[in-house]
Amino acid sequence: MKPVPIVRAARGGLSGRRVQAIVVGLVVFCSTAAATLALGLLVDSSAPFNRAFAAQHGADVTATVSGASQAQLAATTRLPGVTASAGPFPETSVSVTTQATSVSVARGHAHKTTTASHQELTLVGRSSPGGPVDDLTLTSGHWPTGPGQIVLSSQSGLQLGVGSQMTVTGVAGSPKLTVVGIATSATGTAQGWVTPGEIAALHSAGAPQTAQMLYGFSSAATTGAVAKDIAAITAALPHGSVLGTESWLNARAQATASFAPWVPFIVAFVLIGLAMSVLIVINVVSGAVVAGIRRIGVLKAIGFSPAQVVAAYVLQVALPAAVGCAAGVTTGNLVAAPMLGQAAQVFGVGSLAVPFWVSLVVPLAMLALVGVTAFAIALRAGRMSAIQAIATGRAPRPAHGYGAHRLLGRVHRLPRPVTIGLAGPFARPARTLVTLAAIMFGVTAVIFSAGLRTSLVRAQADLSRAASEQVQVQLAGREGLVLINGQSSAKLSLAAQERAVQAALRAQPGTLHYVAEASGQISVLGLSDQLSVVGFEGDASWTGYAMIAGHWYSGPGQVDVNAAFLHDTGTAVGDMYTLTSDGQHTTVHIAGEVFDTAGGMPEMIGALPTLSAVDPGLAPNEYEVALAPGTDTASYVNTLNHVLGKGYEVSANDNGGTVIFALLGLVGALTLLIAVVAGLGVLNTVVLQTRERVHDLGVFKAVGMTPGQTIAMVVSTVAGTGLAAGLIAIPAGVALHWYVLPVMGNAAQTGLPAAVLDVYHAPQLILLALSGLVIAVAGALAPASWAARARTASALRAE
């Protein structure tokens, strides 16, 4: 079989079917770009963590134990399924105070401001960073060689470099620790490491002696497998001795939380795009075959075999598809690059890009999909005899659509050109169904996109609480107001600062509510990650926290927590939970679950007296202020800044919309791509229908059909299909929204309030369903205009 005739036949088909070639290329381009982006993000979302975890022999399970003997702990390392272990390492939690100095320039003068911060750290005593499990990576400095030295975790949250110092509070002598190194643990087993002997000096009087055990298991790939491993450890140790455990799966989820929520909706759009691609390619190829049946007969008459005919038509589709694949995979890589670059910095694993195999597999898979579809449809045409193909012609069989024409002809309220157009789809029912499905997928994407945008905006508003906490006033804390250029400026106690702020807020017109807020991070035994605590000094029910379950705390000992806390501790709303930190024990009642990601950290919110019992160093550091309706926020902030003077920082609450704008932009771009693809499918359908009925068009023009009536007739051939597709898409779009949004929330380690999910209303859905009509009309306008401009004589001569 010589390839030259096949190539010539394919080239001739492409030159005569340029619109179809462009449609195939653009459809495949959009689908390939979206598929490359989604699969690249899906594969690389956990790549930095996985690399670090493998290189460091990360711990599948980290256990905090108290009251177990050395022999009992050693026995757990020989349990079935344990492949590696390390420890026991002595462990404690401490309160530390650090100082940071910032320089600002105002009116040509530099001002130094020194502020102190208070934080809880979980420290582990290890003689070296290496080991069979959790082989730490030192990114700078060296390992502690004596007392008073500490290696900080790069995930500790403290922005301190080598040589910095911190003061340990709550311990006799308030010892100082010097940072001698920075290290990374894949699973965040501690916020800092010291020598084993240093732990005893930092241990609070009366606090229980605790130790850390690290385990690797042969089976720990799923939540169920890890739960079984933890159950085996717990059963092998004395009752109550396991204070807490942490799974590597939780650590991975936190590490991927930065853009993991992006993946589910991208995958949803990709699946819609792939389904539309298949449908439109089927439509294009089948239309090319039907429109070229006489040409197929001619090819057979001059000696083409059935295999050559099939090969020519497959090649005719594969060539523009190959161009679309190449452009699509390039675009997908370009869009994914900035997202992956941010994740690569978390674990210091170098640069990240879409894996090569993704860039290879996606276009090959798309090209194979197009080729298989084209082959299956062209095979039937290849089997036809030359005489049968030439005699068949291009027009549909006489019986198709006549009943619809007669029925619609009786509807006198509609112009005759419109009824002719509305009856047109019945002549090609299979093609009409494919077009309807393509438009339906497009409208589904539009409905899903509209709901997704509303949900994301509401979620961002709930997370920022900018509508209820319009202004924030920062305090300097216990160390005094500020130190300016090294000299004390109006050094005040914390109580004095609070009195000054409260007096200013009461006197300031426009103040509706205000409450003091104390926030910090503490290390709690049983949690490898730090616990974010937020305590309010008064009624804070107005602050705008959205509730997922339960209710806002309303009494002593009650707290609200986020989904990450419930997940990491295995608790539920209504449970009692005992906090153990820095030798303090406090049992709290979980009253509700709040919608707050807290940067992926577990979080607890309650009254300041309740949380101060476990963190005595917790003190107000800012005031949340709600403004009366009609108050200008900028004027309020400027006035309050002038009243309070230097040292206080008054600012408007930033809604943090940078990420949400990026998400909304991506949603809009993907929706536009889907809508364009659907419009291209309509365009191809109308082009085929117009070419098939070009002789009839000449007759209509000869008997007086005007250009406007011609456009109305052609547009009407897909208008009904667009309306039907829009109605069908309503339940599909709503169902997709209700499925994808919770998956996105799980990826961000949070549940979602009902208000974030329930975003659709009947009038809105009706308007969104009309997008099917818009897509249909937009796709039909170009061929309709061509039909209106066609000369009557040329149309009558066409066959």
Image (tube, grey):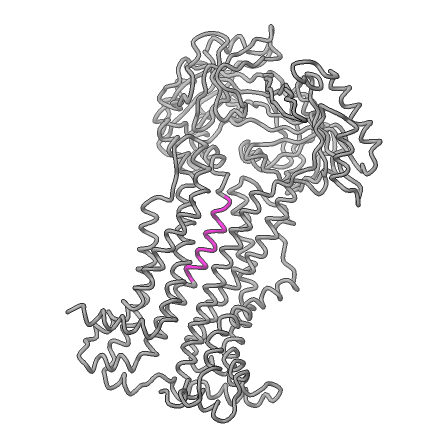
| Residue at point 55%, 56% (across, down) | 449
Figure quadrant of residue 765: bottom right
- Residue 431 image position (x, y, % from top left): 42, 75
| Left or right of 388 in this view: 254 | right
Residue 472 point in image, percent of width and height? 71, 33
Range drawn in magenta: 261-275
Image point (38%, 42%), residue name:
353
Is 657 displayed left or right of 697 in the figure? right
- Residue 642 is left or right of residue 413, and the answer is right
Direction left: furthest residue: 1
Q: In x, y percent, where is residue 633? A: 74, 40
Residue 115 visible:
no
Asked if the stretch drawn in magenta spans residue 607, the answer is no
Is residue 525 shown to the viewer in this render?
yes
For this rendering, which residue is in front, 671 or 400? 671
- The residue at the far top in this view is 173
